[in-house]
Image (cartoon, grey):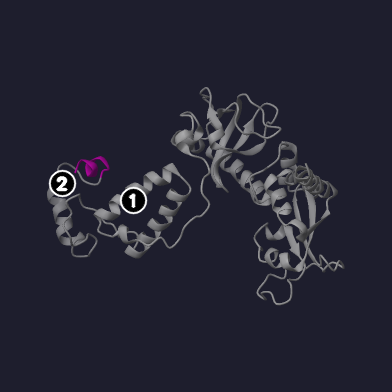
Amino acid sequence: MSALRENGIIDGDGLDTVRKDIEKVLKPYKILPEFPLRDGYFAGTAILSTHELTKVFDVLQSQAKSLDDPVALEIYEIFATRMVKSKLGVSNVYPVRAITNRSMIEPEFLPSDTLSKNLQQLEEAIIKGQLLELNRFPGGGKFALDEEGFFLAFPLQIVFCNQAWYLGFECEGGKYAGLFRFERLDRLFVGQFQGRFRSKQEQEKSLQKLQKLSAASAGIFLGYSASDQHKFLSNDKQEHSQACITVELWFNDAMFRFIAEGTKRFPARQMNMSPPVEGGRLMLPKSIFCLKKTTNKQFPNRFRVVLPIWYLGDVEFLRWIVGFGGNVKVVQPEELVAKVKGIGEAILKVYQQ
């Protein structure tokens, strides 16, 4: 009753009114279930049907358990408790869907001040557009251009990618002013409080830029140049082209059967291929399979994609190409040809020792 009064649903005591509502509306119209409601009155299927609620529970269960999402896990536990009380039988929900990607980070062994253990505060900062002072834990994994020390950034979004949770943010001031980046939550912590906020409109505008860069890169590596990112986001075609590079790979028939299936590996407007190997699926978009085959008998299948110039430094992209072994030939750009050759030579050198 106190909750009803606090939310302005009833005035004064109102107990008789609530009883009449239950007697004449909620019960007769099956809004409330038939069994005794010892834990309170609730309308479990007022918004979704029993089947739909079970589906939502299944999806939430997959995310909470597979991705080690503490926020989703908390909601999942509340959801499960209430599903049990509503007699909707969550114990009998068969896990039809599952997310096989799992977080490789064990939260139990992380420092208490890591962003991974302070998600509620981080989410509030994102929603409020709050500027944060961030730093990387010393001794942790980092790339060549990652620097230790405090830096300012506006947090924009929390993202799960491959095997870990990342924070997408926009650097504010300093050497990388205006740079959009993703970094692992478990590698970052917050420094001193910053009493600076920006509007929701500014946050959403920056988030759109971050998402556009990420979609074009087909990943979370966005390089280290704010200037390159600015050019890529430009509506001027000439300026935009200065931040792009064309990658061309040739595949043999056996591997190209797999490649041809990945019509969403990169954005469709950036990617083209030669026709599929004979005997392949017929229902494929002609806009993508529009290139001529090569004249190379060993590698007759052509794959071409236009990518942001920083993508050549993405370790996941390089791992993808090297993983094809002798089934692929890198044709352009020369920088990528040299990188792949260098990786191959380094591997060979290790095993010759």
Vertical arrangement, residue 164 with respect to residue 329, above or below:
above
In the picture, the quarter occupied by the C terminus is top right
Residue 54 on the magenta segment: no
Circle 2 residues within 10 Å: few <14, some 14–19, many ≥20 = few
As rendered, which of 85 and 225 lies closer to the eye?
85
Which of these two is toward me, 198 or 278? 278
- Residue at the disc numbered 2: 14
Query: Which sits earlier in the primary sequence, circle 1 or circle 2?
Result: 2
Give the percent coordinates (x, y) of residue 291.
80, 67
Q: Which residues are magenta?
A: 1-8
Q: Amino acid at mark 2?
A: Gly
Residue under label 1, please give it: 79
Query: Which secondary structure class fits the magenta region best?
Result: helix
Amino acid type of the residue tagged 1 in the rendering: Phe
Classify 10 Å Cα crowding around label 1: few (below 14), some (14-19), many (20 and above): some
Of residues 275 and 242, the one drawn nearer to the viewer in this rendering: 275
Q: Nearer the viewer, mark 1 or mark 2?
A: 1
Q: SS of the residue at dot 2?
A: loop
Q: Is residue 327 above or below residue 109?
A: below
Residue visible at 24% across and 53% down in the picture: 85
Q: Is residue 323 above or below residue 342?
A: below
Side (left or right) of 184 relative to 304: left
Q: How many marks?
A: 2
Q: Which percent across, then down, holds residue 149?
A: 62, 24
